[in-house]
Image (cartoon, rainbow, N blue to C red):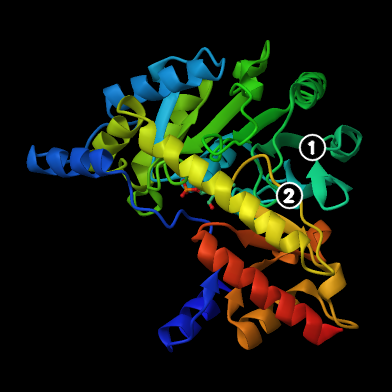
Amino acid sequence: MVAEARRRAAEGHDVVRLDIGEPDLPTPAHIVEAGVAALRAGATRYVAPAGIPPLRAAIADVQRTRGVAATAEQVVVTSGAKPMLLYALLALVQRGDEVLVPDPGYPGYAAAARIAGARVRHYPLARDGAQFRLDVDALRAAVRERTRVLVLNTPQNPTGCVLDDHERLAIAELAEERDLWVVSDEIYDGLRYDDRAASSVAALPGMAARTVVVDGFSKTYAMTGWRLGYGVMPSSLVPAVTALVNESTTCAPAFVQHAGLAALTGPQDDAIAMRELFRARRDALVAGLRGVAGVRAEAPDGAFYVFADVAGLLRAGETCVALADRLLREHDVACIPGAAYGRRGEGMLRLAFTTSEERIREAVTRIRAGGQEGT
Ligand code: PLP
């Protein structure tokens, strides 16, 4: 869908892009300046595979704000959160072990688990109208003898749901009881709209010893192209994960790590302003979608996606993949079909509010036109 949207745009079509999961805003200037200054100062060589010490220390400090008592030595810096997900699973699973991933959920988890030689089992999220939440009973029922890792994502892509204290506690109990590792992808933590204090499952008693927190700079600081992320893990896992970095990329680029350090230790005003802009766009998109017959949409608590129920827009026999295709070809609005995130995503579309309010309103007008055509 993304490739087709790009192709049409390159051909001169005025495509409204709600497909891409990356901020449309520039990286804040002080972060860019720190990267440029680091280049000028000679940060052009290999550095330690686990990351430069001040960045590892700054990441450990951020973890403490989420209640996780981590030290710099427990941090491994990687070229994005995505490779960290893969390294964590490579370090944790043996061939034939099972990895639990959410449905609907980010497709990268299943891909990484398979590369690591694991079997993938999906745990269904519970659906209430157009909203999804963790279903603790369904999660418990999905655990098998060979289950080794549970992948969590909060705030979640594509549903935007955020785990609450009660859910985190239930996960911790289950992980303890069934001796599971937890890989907790918190890449959207800087984009929460619920105003609750940040908290990670790794902050619960005993959980830091069985959790890898995965995070990065792409979303909160609009740094997708810089490729910078990290994992925070028990000390016992650090040598294996560091060896995987060393044998694949050697290290994340030094000047990029200096830019990341500026992101974490510098002023947070730009990141906060971006979050507030996304909040306004979210509200505009949800309000617009609620005015379209056949669409049900809820405001997500985090991330920058509305996962909308579009079952009422489908023609007889039409899937959400075919609907997304039709909306792109006939109305030049690009979104991702829910089925791309798992079986429970059928009948849904993921709409990224990573474009201006004006373009969001235009997208809603076009989706409405697509719906009317179907009736
Ligand atoms: N995890 C989730 C849930 C994502 O949505 C994404 C990117 O879309 C990533 C991880 C990867 O982030 P990064 O750019 O840091 O590799």
Tally of numbered tags: 2
Task: Say which mark, if any, is on residue 332.
Answer: none
Task: Say which mark, if any, is on residue 146.
Answer: 1
Q: Where is residue 125 in the image (x, y as percent from the top left)?
A: 82, 45
Image-based side of 208 in relation to 258, left or right: right
Image-based side of 147 in relation to 116, left or right: right
Give the residue at mark 2.
Answer: 119
Residue depicted at x 77% and y 72%: 320
Image-based side of 47 in relation to 371, left or right: left
From this view, report whether residue 323 is shown above or below residue 40: below
Do we see residue 56 in this rendering?
yes
Residue depicted at x 43% and y 89%: 11
Image-based side of 363 in relation to 267, left or right: right
From this view, report whether residue 345 is shown above or below residue 197: below
Q: Is mark 1 on a helix, strand or loop?
A: loop
Q: Which residue lies furthest to the left in this view?
A: 41
Labels 2 & 1 near each other (Cβ < 8 A)? yes
Mark 2 Cα shell of 10 Å, populated few (<14), some (14-19), many (≥20): some
Residue depicted at x 49% and y 85%: 8
Work out whether residue 147 or residue 40 is closer to the camera in this orientation and state it: 40
Identified by mark 1, the residue type is: Arg
Identified by mark 2, the residue type is: Arg
Work out whether residue 132 or residue 139 is closer to the camera in this orientation and state it: 132
Q: Where is residue 348 in the image (x, y as percent from the top left)?
A: 77, 63
State which quarter of the image contains the C terminus: bottom right
- In space, the residues marked 2 and 1 are separated at their CA atoms by 9 Å
Earlier residue among tags 2 and 1: 2
